[in-house]
Image: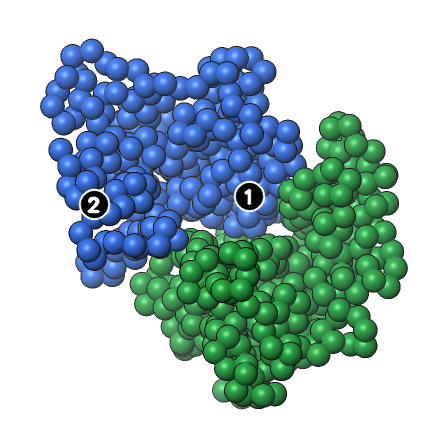
Chain colours: A blue, B green
């Protein structure tokens, strides 16, 4: 099936795989922010995960070791953010920015030796029998790699976890009203540490997807703003893991469209001819911004409050007896 | 609004909950601080400690930590740091190059500082820098052969307007739709840098440039004057004048006062009848204008054309510069020179086989340790009255006199 020389099935399949790293980071950030901690360090976390995953796969020969390394590296870097925001109670915006700078610098410094190397092992498409024979959906959804399947499976699981389980309720309580949660005997600091680490691990995994699946190589700044797009998608998704799937694939679609338009070239109708590639590359960023504007516009028109966790960005200081 | 009414407002502000740094409950439940003299002295001491001690110490600790990273990756930190110092401040040439790098940092640092003081997180100084550079370059390419000396004022204004307009997009989105400005400014950074690439690859590319992605060199009249034989250009004057202006705005004008109230306590700002929508637009345009001026001074003073890599991440380093200087304009000038040296030494680092990311690594580490120092100092002086002084000092606001002396 094709339109103007663009293979639509390929376009949608690319959409799914391009959306996956952003989806993983967005899901991590939803956890993170649900506990009341804003994390603007996603870009740095993804970079560190990308490099750690790449390096570990290189030295071990197995992508799964790479995945483990990415999860651990993301969590380790997130631990810094947790310490600063939960224990030291510093400004979460600035701590997140510092985290991104730190991660960007660290990976550029340590990653120099990995430029131009190909990994011995990458995530390859795993064709699921029967399901992949479904017309249209088969080739789009069921000829992907394992991390894509994993991300599609965990998004609804996280939704159930947040809304239908006891730990999920505690997580939401800490994000909405830490004082109430504290008085119920829930450890606000403990919960926040835990979910900042989980968020970091997922962001690290998202980064590793870039170096182990999408484009198995290491480049400086390989994330190219995907961490920031994930920060935006959390708002777009209204802190809801299911809507994060939609947001991530919307972003993935923009990225896929950019490649398809470039590849299709002269088969395109006249008005799409010769769009300089620079403008196509702007698409994901502009669409992310547009999506955010749309969300806020709807809030404004419907006069509803945003469903951001009420304590998002605020450190919790227990009232001391004096 | 006169001065007397300002004071009345700041008195009433105190009863409003201060978000982020002091929790609501502590403010209302703690007994009022005893009124005695020594608190003034300790408040001063803390502010000096915050203003000098914490930044200095955090820089030292950050360099030590990064030194450990260097050592574990097989480089001798002492050799590396020695080389960095030499290449940044070692001789007259090095110092001049450091100052050249400091100019855009001063301007972008001031740009983010004035936005931050109204608690608007303009992370887009990098993009506004490019917008200013593009606007100024456009003027030079079009008119430098016809306007004579007048081209420079035209480029000056174009740079400011370019940056201001680019910053107004997130400003409008924030003011009218409450779109998070951190994300919008960041997304627009990517967009404008891609647009700049487009210009130098296609319509503005120099036909005689052997297909390199750059514009032709501007005429001599579109070049900023330099001091003597050095490479230090007139942009330094722009930076210092801008520091004076931003300092005056923040400390002497009603508008500056309104911005700080918006930053310290948005609820109080609304109740005080401050026009928040208008101020968001104004401060974003002002902030973007300063960053745009940085871009203009860079293309006219240093590069003399539009090309890739005209910014060494100035707009991002500016965030650290502003925070380290606790949003104080003169502090920004000083810190910008130090960080100009850091960026300058980054080029020398490549010569001894260390990736450029090294400089970013140090910057991230410095910011972390500044935050840690502030937090620890705050824990150390846990008393209510001192916390108030701290919370205001951290936001870069000089506490109202009655708050300290009361």
Closer to the camera, B254 or B368? B368
Q: From this viewpoint, is residue B112 visible? A: yes
Closer to the camera, B337 or B35? B337
Q: Position of residue A299 (x, y in %)?
A: 25, 56
CA distance for labels 2 and 1: 41 Å
Number of marks in picture: 2
Q: Quadrant of residue A140?
A: top left
Q: Position of residue B382 (x, y in %)?
A: 67, 50
Q: Quadrant of residue A146?
A: top left
Q: Position of residue B217 (x, y in %)?
A: 59, 70
Label 2 or label 1, whichever comes before in sequence order:
1
Q: Could you tell whether B20 is left or right of A138 in the image?
A: right
The label shown at residue A275 is: none
Q: Quadrant of residue A34?
A: top left
- Toward the left, the furthest residue is A135
Asked if B284 appears above or below A71 in the picture, the reply is below
Chain letter belonging to callout 2: A
Which residue does the numbered mark 2 point to in the structure image? A267
Chain letter belonging to callout 1: A
Q: Position of residue A307 (x, y in %)?
A: 30, 47
Around disc 1, counting alpha carbons within 10 Å, would you say few (fewer than 14), some (14 to 19), or many (20 or more)? many
Q: Residue at x 58, y 55 (%)?
A: B309
Tell me the mark number nearer the camera, choosing from 2 and 1.
2
Q: Residue at x 20, y 61 (%)?
A: A301
Which residue does the numbered mark 1 point to in the structure image? A100
Q: Could you tell whether B194 is left or right of B330 in the image?
A: left
């Amino acid at each position: 099936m094709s339109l103007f020389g663009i293979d639509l099935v390929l376009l949608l399949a690319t959409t799914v795989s391009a959306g996956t790293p952003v989806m993983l980071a967005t899901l991590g950030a939803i956890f993170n922010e649900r506990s009341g901690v804003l994390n603007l360090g996603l870009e740095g976390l993804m970079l560190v995960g990308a490099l750690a995953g790449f390096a570990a796969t290189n030295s071990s020969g197995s992508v799964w070791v790479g995945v483990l390394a990415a999860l651990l590296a993301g969590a380790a870097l997130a631990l810094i953010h947790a310490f600063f925001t939960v224990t030291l109670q510093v400004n979460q915006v600035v701590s997140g920015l510092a985290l991104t700078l730190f991660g960007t610098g660290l990976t550029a410094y340590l990653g120099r030796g990995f430029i131009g190397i190909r990994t011995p092992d990458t995530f390859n498409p795993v064709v699921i029998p029967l399901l992949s024979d479904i017309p249209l959906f088969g080739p789009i959804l069921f000829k992907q790699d394992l991390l894509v399947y994993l991300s599609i499976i965990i998004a609804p699981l996280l939704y159930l976890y947040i809304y239908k389980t006891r730990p999920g309720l505690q997580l939401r309580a800490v994000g909405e009203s830490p004082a109430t949660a504290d008085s119920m005997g829930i450890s606000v600091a403990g919960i926040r540490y835990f979910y900042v680490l989980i968020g970091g691990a997922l962001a690290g995994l998202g980064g590793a997807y870039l170096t182990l699946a999408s484009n198995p190589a290491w480049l400086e700044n390989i994330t190219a703003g995907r961490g920031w797009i994930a920060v935006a998608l959390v708002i777009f998704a209204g802190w809801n893991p299911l809507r994060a799937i939609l947001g991530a694939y919307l972003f993935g679609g923009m990225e896929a469209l950019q490649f398809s338009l470039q590849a299709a070239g002269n088969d395109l109708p006249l008005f799409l001819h010769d769009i300089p590639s620079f403008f196509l590359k702007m698409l994901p960023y502009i669409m992310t911004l547009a999506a955010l504007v749309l969300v806020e516009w709807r809030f404004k028109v419907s006069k509803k409050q945003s469903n951001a966790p009420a304590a998002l960005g605020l450190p919790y200081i227990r009232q001391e007896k004096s | 609004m006169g001065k007397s009414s300002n004071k009345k407002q700041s008195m009433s502000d105190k009863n409003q909950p201060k978000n982020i740094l002091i929790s609501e409950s502590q403010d209302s439940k703690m007994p009022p601080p005893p009124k005695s003299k020594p608190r003034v002295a300790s408040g001063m001491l803390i502010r000096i400690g915050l203003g000098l001690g914490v930044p200095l110490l955090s820089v030292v600790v950050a360099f030590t930590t990064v030194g450990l990273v260097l050592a574990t990756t097989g480089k001798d930190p002492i050799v590396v740091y020695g080389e960095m110092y030499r290449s940044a401040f070692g001789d007259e040439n090095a110092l001049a190059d450091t100052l050249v790098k400091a100019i855009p940092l001063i301007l972008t640092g001031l740009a983010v500082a004035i936005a931050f003081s109204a608690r608007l997180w303009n992370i887009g100084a990098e993009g506004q820098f490019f917008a200013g550079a593009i606007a100024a370059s456009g003027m030079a390419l079009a008119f430098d052969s016809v306007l004579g000396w007048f081209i420079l004022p035209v480029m000056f204004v174009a740079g400011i307007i370019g940056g201001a307009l680019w910053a107004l997009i997130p400003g409008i989105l924030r003011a009218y739709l409450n779109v998070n400005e951190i994300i919008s400014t960041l997304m627009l950074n990517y967009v404008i840098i891609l647009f700049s690439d487009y210009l130098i690859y296609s319509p503005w590319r120099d036909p005689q440039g052997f297909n390199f992605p750059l514009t032709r060199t501007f005429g001599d009249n579109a070049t900023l004057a330099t001091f003597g034989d050095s490479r230090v250009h007139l942009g330094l004057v722009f930076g210092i004048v801008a520091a004076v202006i931003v300092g005056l705005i923040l400390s002497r004008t009603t508008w500056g006062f309104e911005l700080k109230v918006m930053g310290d306590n948005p609820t109080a700002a609304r109740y005080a009848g401050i026009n928040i929508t208008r101020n968001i637009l104004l401060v974003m345009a002002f902030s973007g204008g300063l960053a745009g001026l940085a871009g203009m001074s860079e293309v006219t003073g240093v590069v003399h054309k539009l090309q890739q890599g005209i910014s060494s991440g100035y707009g991002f380093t500016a965030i650290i510069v502003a925070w380290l200087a606790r949003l104080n304009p003169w502090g920004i000038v000083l810190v910008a020179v130090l960080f100009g040296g850091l960026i300058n030494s980054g080029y020398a680092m490549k010569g001894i086989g260390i990736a450029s990311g090294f400089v970013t690594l140090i910057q991230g580490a410095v910011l972390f340790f500044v935050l840690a120092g502030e937090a620890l100092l705050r824990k150390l002086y846990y008393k209510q009255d001192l916390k108030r002084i701290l919370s205001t000092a951290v936001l870069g606001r000089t506490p109202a006199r009655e708050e300290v002396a009361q």
